Image (cartoon, rainbow, N blue to C red):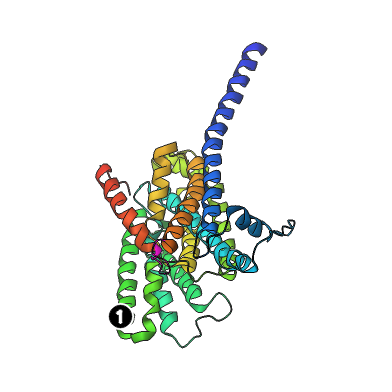
């Protein structure tokens, strides 16, 4: 029998261990939230009209139902903050978190740090859906959200569903088959979109803006419609974070530990794909965010998914807010598409990761 003293000591060690684990997560979380708050405030102050940080924050907080602030500032500043910059910052937070969080989930499912949200053809399917909506006779701005982002969302989801069906063999979804089916469908969707670009004439010109990605057309309506999908996917990933840690073992070992590997993969991929599809529908195609941010978080704080997922969400949001601020201010009044900036950053980063990655795990 164990003496009470030894039991108490063990209990103390257990509590200390749990406290240390919580502290290891709390520090990076607090740092990430502080960074996110700072870049959001900075984004609100930057633009053609330079607005003081205190005034910008006051106008933003005044939108909350339980807060009433009336800063002594021109009414035009209020319209700039509330109607232009604030929805854009909110959209950047949602899109950055969705792409980064889904990227971390994809890397966990495929056990490959080089995986990203567009691995299954999500980007190409969304681009095809948007292209069809742009050249169709449908009014682009109908019903607030617009046919273009709605069609992009449906195109991305349809691609993921079709890839999953093609990869299913004997009731199970094989990881290698998923990637191969995604590559094939991505090529087909890209070919159709290119044909639409070549034959659509002037009407097809807006397709370029969607392909390169950007937040210059966002509105509160788009933010409100996309938010539930991103929140829902985030909750699913939070619940399955422990399963993702188990999934990093050999699949046979994971099964012996009681994890239904096939079902876990389908659930995680569905949630991550839903998040990525919503992000693409709002902002177009913005590559490399889901690759770079989770890998940077993994290098800094380790690869446990109960820590990796929340940190990827927060730092991904901060990263895209900062990139979007740079995109709209560096050569104002012109804007640099977000996809171009993330490609400039992500391309070299991807090559470095490829060089460091000696074994591909699929």
- 350 over 163 or under it: above or below: above
Percent position (x, y) of residue 212? 37, 68
Percent position (x, y) of residue 133? 45, 80
Query: Residue visible at 49% across and 59% down?
Result: 95
Q: Which residues are magenta?
A: 330-338
Quarter location, residue 337 = bottom left
- Most extreme residue toward the bottom is 137
Query: Residue visible at 56% across and 36% down?
Result: 26
Q: Is residue 309 magenta?
A: no
Percent position (x, y) of residue 245? 46, 41
Quarter location, residue 124 = bottom left
Q: Quick check: 356 left or right of 205?
A: left
| Residue situated in front as seen by the camera: 240 or 51 | 51
Q: Quick check: 219 left or right of 211?
A: right
Mark 1, other Cα within 10 Å: few <14 / some 14–19 / many ≥20: few
Specify the quadrant that holds the N terminus.
top right
Q: Which residue bears the numbered disc 1?
A: 195
Q: Could you tell me if residue 270 is visible in this image?
A: yes
């Amino acid at each position: 029998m164990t003496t009470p003293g030894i039991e108490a000591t063990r209990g103390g060690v257990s509590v200390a261990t749990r406290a240390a684990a919580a502290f290891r997560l709390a520090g990076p979380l607090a740092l990430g939230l502080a960074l996110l708050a700072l870049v959001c405030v900075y984004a609100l102050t930057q633009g053609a009209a330079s607005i003081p940080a205190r005034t910008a924050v006051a106008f933003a907080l005044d939108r909350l139902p339980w807060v009433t602030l009336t800063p002594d500032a021109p009414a035009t500043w209020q319209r700039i903050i509330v109607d232009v910059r604030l929805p854009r910052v909110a959209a950047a937070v949602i899109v950055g978190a969705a792409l980064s969080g889904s990227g971390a989930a994809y890397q966990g499912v495929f056990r490959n740090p080089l995986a990203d949200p567009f691995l299954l053809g999500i980007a190409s399917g969304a681009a095809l859906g948007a292209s069809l909506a742009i050249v169709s006779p449908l009014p682009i701005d109908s019903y607030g959200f617009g046919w273009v982002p709605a069609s992009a969302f449906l195109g991305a989801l349809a691609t993921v569903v079709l890839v999953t069906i093609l990869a299913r063999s004997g009731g199970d979804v094989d990881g290698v088959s998923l990637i191969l089916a995604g590559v094939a469908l991505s090529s087909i969707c890209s070919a159709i979109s290119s044909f639409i670009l070549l034959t659509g004439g002037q009407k097809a010109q807006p397709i370029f803006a969607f392909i390169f990605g950007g937040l210059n057309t966002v509105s509160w309506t788009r933010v409100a419609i996309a938010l539930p999908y991103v929140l829902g996917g985030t909750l699913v990933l939070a619940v399955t974070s422990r399963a993702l840690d188990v999934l990093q073992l050999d699949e046979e070992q994971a099964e012996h530990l009681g994890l239904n590997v096939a079902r876990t993969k389908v659930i995680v991929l569905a949630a991550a794909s839903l998040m990525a599809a919503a992000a693409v529908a709002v902002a177009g195609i913005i590559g490399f965010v889901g690759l770079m941010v989770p890998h940077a978080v993994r290098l800094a704080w380790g690869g446990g998914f109960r820590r990796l997922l929340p940190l990827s969400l927060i730092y991904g949001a901060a990263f895209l807010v900062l990139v979007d601020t740079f995109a709209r201010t560096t050569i104002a009044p012109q804007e640099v598409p977000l996809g171009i900036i993330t490609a400039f950053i992500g391309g070299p980063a991807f090559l470095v990761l490829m060089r460091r990655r000696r074994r591909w795990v699929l």
